[in-house]
Image (tube, rainbow, N blue to C red):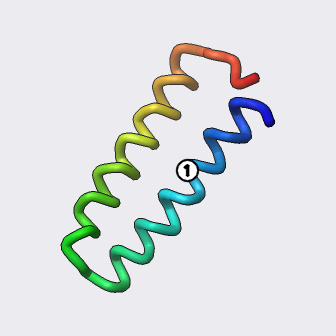
């Protein structure tokens, strides 16, 4: 498995968990939002810096 595929898998899982947090409106939803924002920032930084995703 390539690193890029692994990263996209993590992003997909975070999006699903984020949607579950929005739907259920539990307190864990705040944590999911924070994790989603961190994942987006990491992806954007990699794109901006031009890092190759193997």
Residue 43 placement, left or right of 52: left
Q: Label 1: few (<14), some or many (≥20) within 10 Å?
A: some
Residue 6 to residue 32: above or below? above
Furthest residue toward left = 27
Image coordinates of residue 7 in percent, x first then y, are 62, 39
Query: How many numbered circles does the render carry?
Result: 1
**Residue 25, position as x, y percentages in the image:** 26, 81
Query: Taking 32 as reference, is 6 left or right?
Result: right
Task: Kindly indicate the quadrant of the structure image that contains residue 4.
Answer: top right
Q: Which residue is mark 1?
A: 11
Comparing 50 with 10, the one in front is 10
Left or right for 50, reference 43:
right
Q: Height in image: 4 above or below 37?
A: above
Q: Residue at x 70, y 30 (%)?
A: 3
Q: Up-down: is 19 above or below 1?
A: below
Q: Secondary structure at mark 1?
A: helix
Position of the C terminus, as image quadrant, is top right
Q: Residue at x 28, y 69 (%)?
A: 29
Among all residues in the image, which is located at the extreme bottom? 24
Residue at 54% over, 23% down: 46
Q: Residue at x 52, y 20 (%)?
A: 48
Instruction: Estimate the x, y position of residue 31 in percent, counting from the top left.
Output: 26, 58
Residue at the limit of the structure toward the front, as seen here: 1
Q: Hey, which residue is sitting farthest right in the picture?
A: 1
Q: Where does the image place residue 22, in percent across and percent down from the top left?
A: 34, 77
Looking at the rendered image, the quarter that the N terminus falls into is: top right
């Amino acid at each position: 498995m390539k690193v890029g595929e692994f990263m996209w898998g993590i992003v997909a899982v975070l999006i699903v968990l984020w949607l579950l947090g929005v739907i259920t409106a539990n307190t864990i939803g705040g944590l999911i939002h924070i994790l989603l924002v961190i994942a987006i920032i990491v992806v954007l930084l990699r794109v901006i810096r031009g890092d190759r995703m193997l």
